[in-house]
Amino acid sequence: MPNNFQQPICSIIIPAHNEDLVIGHTLDTVVSGAQNGEFDIIVVCNGCSDKTSQIAETFTPHVRVIETTTASKTNALNLGLKAARVYPVVFLDADISTSAAAIRAMVKQQRKTGANLAYGQAIFETHRCSWLVRAFYKAWQQNPYFDHKKMGGFFSLNHSALKELKTFPDILNDDEFVRRRFQHNSVWVKHAQYTIKAPHTLRSLINVRSRIYRGNQALTKINFGFTAKTLHQNTFTFATRLIKSPSLWLGAVIFVLTAIAAHSKNHLTPSSHQHWDKDTSARINARES
């Protein structure tokens, strides 16, 4: 196999807002396994006040760094799309770990099938989490949402999908927006594995869930939500699976209490005071992973 590519096989957009604890590891896991010129990697530092951009720049010429003062993930994604040189475009969150081999497998399968959307196999890292969080994740993965595998944080859109999409709207759940829009023509790639570090504490988990619920509510307002019938069916299926699994009952209780706490947080916090709710607990020891 040649060591130099005349043209990259894909562009990779990594939006990053104050991610100096993780961006180095994320880039290293991709770049170290890539051949020269194989990927067009773009890190979009948005509203950073830390060393994210300086760390990302140490990976040049393998990585291009774009900086903007606007702290917005969707704006960063759109800036990355304007700078992308080839298709398909892979989207990778700055706190997610994957490999060049995983990206290569995802792009290959997407081209083979012609799917608008390709996504990989999520692996949740929970060994450093509290027992409450671990119990939550065991129960949560019985959700019918996982029947089509987890989609988020690491996925690829081909030229046709991006032409239809044009730009990302100003929303919180960009990956869920993409999933709902292109799930009908998508492919799950088992060998495209990526690792998501779960929140270490219940408080951090509640913060993350409150952001997800806010994002999903916003999608409903722009007619990208599920129908009431679908929601009821999913809830019934989820509850049935948990009831039939006594080993998951504790996790089910934690799931319900977490959902109540997250929704209550959203209800009690004025919209003007709501923010991204980034999970910092999983990033504290990220450099040791």
Image: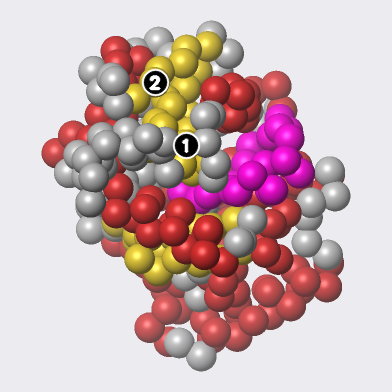
Residue 34 lies, in percent from the top left, at 26, 42
Q: What residue is shown with label 1?
A: 11
The reply to whether the magenta stretch includes residue 153 is no
Q: Is residue 173 rendered magenta in the image?
A: yes
Left or right relative to 3: residue 146 = right
Indicate the quadrant where residue 108 lies: bottom left
The answer, for residue 241, to whether it is visible in the render is yes
Helix, strand or loop status at disc 1: strand
What type is the residue that disc 1 sits on? Answer: Ser
Question: x%, y% of residue 209?
Answer: 54, 48
Question: What segment is highlighted magenta in the picture?
Answer: 154-175
Residue at the spot 35% in from the left edge and 66% down from the top edge = 191
Q: Nearer the viewer, residue 89 or 170?
A: 89
Residue 43: percent from left, percent from top: 42, 25
Q: Which residue lies at the image location 74% right of the left edge and 78% below the top edge?
A: 233
Could you say where residue 49 lies in the image, as x and y percent from the top left? 40, 10
Q: Secondary structure at mark 2?
A: strand
